[in-house]
Each structure stands twice: as C-alpha cells, then as structure tokens.
Amino acid sequence: MTETMTGVSTEPTAQGRRSGLDEPARPGGAAADPALGAAFEGDAAPSAGAAREADLLYLWARLGAVEWRVRQAVAEAFAADPDRRDPYRGLYLTADAVRRVLDAPRQPPLFPPRDDLDLDAFAADVPPPGPRLLALAEDFTLDPLDVELLLVALAPDVDARFELLYGYLNDDVTRRRATVGLALRLCGAPAAGPGRFRLATTAPLVAAGLVEVRDPAEPALARSLRVPDRVVAHLLGDDTPDPAVAPLVHVVPRHSTPAAELPERLGAGLRAGIGPVHLRDSGGDAGPTAVAALAAAGRDAVVVDVTALADRDQPDLAAVVREARLRGAGIVLGPLEPLVPERSRWVRELVALAGDVPVVLHSRQHWDPKWTTRPVVSLPVPSPLPAERAAWWTRAFGGEPAFLPDLAGYRLGAEEVDRAVAVASRLAAVERRPVALEHVRAGVRAQNGAGLDRLARRIVPGVGWDDVVLPERTRAQLAELVVRAKHRERVLGEWRMRPGGGRGRGVVALFAGESGTGKTMSAEVVAGEIGMDLYVVDLSTVVDKYVGETEKNLERIFTEAAGVHGVLLFDEADAVFGKRSEVQSAHDRYANVESAYLLQRMESFDGIAVLTTNLRSNVDEAFTRRIDVIADFPVPDARQRLALWDRCLGPALPRADDLDLEFCAERFELAGGSIRACAVTAAYRAAAGDRPVTMADVVTSVHLEYRKLGRLVLESEFGPWLDAAR
C-alpha cells in the first residue's frame, strides 16, 4: 500500500531508489535553478569545488521541498488557531510571530520553498558518484521515507528558522526539534502506520547512527529527533572524522597504498563479498596487507587502534562502523592479541555491527571461530622477501642508503620501517649530521614494546669486538652467528632451507664455558653487531615450583620476544634446558614434560636466542641438535690474560711505574670476569689513596679474589709480592 502526502511516497520504485523520493509529475515541470548550470559553465570536467557546489545545490533543493511542506503545515495550524488575547503571551510562539519568521529574509543558498522542483534534474547534474545524500541512502540501505525523515531532522542544523517553526508546530516553544509525530506528519505518514517503525531502535536510520531519537521517557510520538554532527558534516561535504572515534581510528586513503599480488587477489574477493577476512601474520606484514587489500577493492581503510580499543570499557563501535560507511571504506582491526581472550567481545560486536562493510582482521594467532558469530575466511600472510624489505627501506629513505645491506637482518613491517626511519632522521637532526647506520638502529630499537622488559632485563649494547679477548676459533663462531642472524630471511625464507613442520626462522646459539670467560659480554657484542638490544631472561621469573607454571612463563617470554627486535639470552640455561632423565617419580615425569615443551618451542621460535652454560654436557643432546651455532669459551691463556689486564684497567686509570701486567698475566690463571673484578678493586684502593694504581694494589685485589673463589694462595704464584698481598 502506498501512502502519499505532499508528493512523498513511502513505496520505493526504481527511480525512487536512485533519488530517495518518488516525485510525481510536477505542474509546469520546472528545471533546476540556473545557478546549478553556472557552476559547470565552460567546464568539460567539473572541478572538485564545482562538484561540491552541485552536491550542495541538490541538498538545498531537497530541504526546500521540506520547507514547502513545513509551510503547508503552518498554514493549517494558522487556520485552526483563533486570534485572541492571551495573558501568557511570550511563553509560546503566536501565529503573528511565526508569520514574521516566514516573511523574514531567507538564509542563502537554501532554495525558495516550491513544490515543482525537478529533483531528478538536480541529481543528474551532480558529477559521479552523484549526490552524497543519495550515496548515503544506498550505503545505509535507506528507503525513500527514511531519506525524508532524515531531511526533516536535518533542517534545523542548516537553517535556524526551522527551530522556531518546529517549536510552533510542536505547540511548545522549548521543543525546537522535529518530534517523531511531527516528522511523520511532514512526510505524509500516519502516526499509527508502519512509517513510525522506521524510527525504531533496529531500523536503519537509528541503528546506523544517522538519526538519534531523544527523550526516551516521553511518549513515542513526542520524542525529538536529532542528526549527529558527523552526519551533518558529511552531507555538507566535510569528511573530518568524528571526534568521538578520532582517538580510536585513523583513515588510510586508498590511493596511498601500493599494489601487490596478495592484496590484489584479496581485494577481488572483498569486492565479491567474501568478508569478513582474517589474515594470519606468519612473519609477514598483515596490517599493511589488509589496508592494501581494501585499496585494491576500491575502498579507503578505517584502521582501528587496538591498544586504544583495549583501554576502553565501552568504546563506541557503532560510530566506527558509521565512519566507515560514510566514507565507503572498509575496517581493519588488528593485531588481535591485546583483545583476546579478555576483550574478544569487541571483535564480535564490531563484526556484527559492520554488516556488509568489509572487515579485515589480523593477528599472529590462528583464527578462533568463537571470536565472532559470522563465518570468517582465514588466510596466511607469507613473510616478505628480502628484496621487498629492501624496497621498503629505499622508499622510506627516498633513495637507497649506503648501509642498506646492514639492514637485512631486521624483520620489520612497512609501517615499522617508516617509523624507524622517522626516528633516525630526528636523531640525526639533533646531532646535526646525516642519517647513519647507528641512527637507524636506534630507530629500530625504539619500535620495541615494553612487554618483554617485565620478563627480562634489557641491555643496550655498549661493547664491540675490540672490547672482548677471545681465541680466534671462538671469534669465528660468533661471526658465524652474526651471519646467520643477518641472512636468515634469505636462507630460511626465500630459499626455504627450513621448510615445513611448523619450524620457525629463528637462530639459536649455545655459549659454553667456565664462569667469567666472556659468554654474556660476547652475547652483547653479537647483539650490537646485529643492531639489536639484548634481553637477559631472569630465571627467577621463569622457574616455578608448581607444575606447568614454568612452561607458561617461558611461553610468555617467547611470545613477547616475537614482537621485539632483540637477542634473547638465557643465562645459566641448563637450569631450564637440562637433560631429561629416566622417569622414576612424578617429579621426573613433569621435569621431562618441561624439557619436551622447550624442545618444541625452540623449533618454532622466530627470533634470535643465545643459551649459556658453564658445562656443555649439562644440556640435553636433543637441544644440541636444534642449536645452530655452538661457541666454546675456554679459560684465557697468558697472552689473552695480558690483553685482558690491559683493557680492564683501561686508558683513563693512572698507573704507577712498578705495575707489571706481564707478571700478573703469567702467574695468575684467572678468567676475564675475575680479572675485571680485580681491576675494579685495585682502582678503588688507588682512589682511596689518591694516587695511581700500584702493583701492590693489583696483587692485593688478586689475593682478595682468590679468597672469594676459595682458591689457595701459593707463594709460587705471588712470588715476591706475597707479603704485599697479605
């Protein structure tokens, strides 16, 4: 059944679906205002400004039709309002006051109220994709009556005269917005008819956030209507994001995203309506891939800030979806790890609200069907090839940097590369010199989150190859570790030298040697050479007496380590990587389960890990098979000890003439850590005497170190300095 008043039809036709209103033939068939033709005069292709002007002209014409119906309603109210004196005059609008409003100069450029405007002519003269009002109706699946209700609610936001007119028609000067009853009356829909349900909570206008129905305590027909500022701004041509969602999202225009093979294929699927889609980041760059896929589908991307979303107790997800719909954009949400499982309801709610809006989710985890009630297609994102990463660095620098080969070891995404280069540029500007490799490495370290800092001690490398004294064989083994760390993407990824079985692309090394032989310092040197931070795992936060807790703690460490660019150091690793034993008790069984878990987890680890042990035989042989590099750290010989004494005392410490470092190196068989401790003790004794460090200070510090280590003090070692040492 079709109900019509003042030319408004509530039953859509093919033409009405396009224009939002079924227009019967108008008397006289007047064309659009001449100003519309002037907007494009002489333009073969309308400019953006001319297109916007034409769009606004169409909106003014539609609002002019609304004003015509308002005037008709006011005329009917005049006829039913006898002219009599009222002691309460001023508390409401009289008929004379309303006439003065109607006769006052109009606000340009709203069209004069006419009933014979050819709205189709206005719509046809707007360049593609046509008027925003009609695009909004199509994107939000509004029928013609919905569009008219929206215009009635919108009128006071573009012309203040409607506030007074609505107040008069509402018979209440304080109610200056259209009520449900008044809006239905102006649209020719009966108050008890099906039109009133177009303003129900689940109807498109209200559910999508285009119209707000206020005053819930009032009767249904007395509730006022308001159009949110974001919707008003959109219809007037402004696409600034809603302040309510601006802290939650940022918009990536589709023309700013380069195309690639996977995004192109995924974009074609999104155009075909395969969404929602989940991208599993298996070492790739899922976030930019999601944005590029939406760009390939011809849509901007509304990217949700997951961290900000997780911090909110009641985020306005409906406003996020409305923002995407107003722009004709898709939504990108990820990585999902901060939301699941505690706040996975935000994922479920956003996907449910999105409807036919393309949604691309991404995470490192496999998709869990419990996260949404809608079926989701999950696809893996492969790790980018080294050439692709090199292209990201080149694009971020605006040209290929000289140190590009030194950046091959970083597993950064495109956005992380941009941020790292931005930080590097600022650091170089502070130092007033060109961007160098150390600036880029500092920029990369700045991308590391603080999650791993709560589980491990973070060390920014401050030593290099010149600061360690090692045998040539050990140096070669460390150099091999650096080579593997820098080129693992090409060997393990591009060349697939570690395929299948869920194996990661990590590099694991074992440093074996007595205490003080330089294992930890060498790990710091390796981290510095690769350009990463060193994270020393605190075993006190890992080992737990309760069954299963140690594995959970280790899993948290491995998970956090996957998100940072650092070297993971398990000092005294045999405490958790020890040998499995024959099961003779429940304790043995659970100890073996812990070792079995570590065996599996080390294979799937994607980072760089260094294990240290004082005794190599304490480490399970199964771990040894999974270790890429084993470096042995022997006790230093006399020549190495001489170099250690010289470097530990350093160039800044003043030395007395009687200092005989060759004697110390020849007689005292100490590891590098003990030599450093002796040097520090001797320096304190020299500082207390306000003099250079003497041989007596050195041998005394050695004597104290022997006592600390529980070693015998022999005259054959100290010789003539024995008495001084005592």
Image: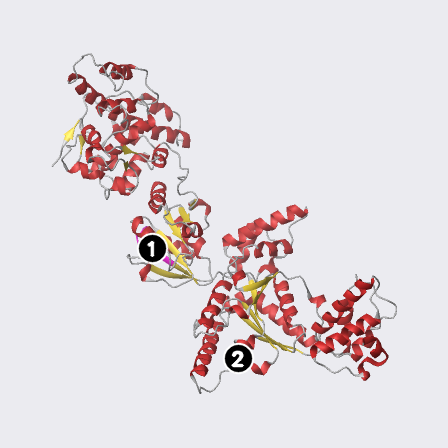
Residue 446 position in % (x across, y down): 57, 54
Which one is earlier in the sequence, the residue at label 1 or at label 2? 1
Q: Is residue 213 left or right of residue 401?
A: left
User: What's the amino acid at mark 1?
Assistant: Arg
Q: Is residue 442 left or right of residue 623?
A: right
Q: Residue at x 67, y 74 (%)?
A: 516
Residue 358 position in % (x across, y down): 34, 50
Tell me where the magenta segment starts and ends, as one range. Answer: 271-278
Q: Is residue 509 left or right of residue 301?
A: right
Q: Front-most of 278 and 264?
A: 278
Q: Which mark is residue 345?
A: 1
Q: Is residue 283 above or below residue 239?
A: below
Alpha carbon of mark 1 to alpha carbon of mark 2: how far?
42 Å
Whether residue 12 is visible to the viewer of this picture, yes or no, is no
Colouring scheme applied when the structure was drawn? secondary structure
Residue 296 position in % (x across, y down): 39, 50
Q: Residue furthest left?
A: 1
Residue 399 position in % (x across, y down): 59, 50
User: What's the amino acid at mark 2?
Assistant: Gly
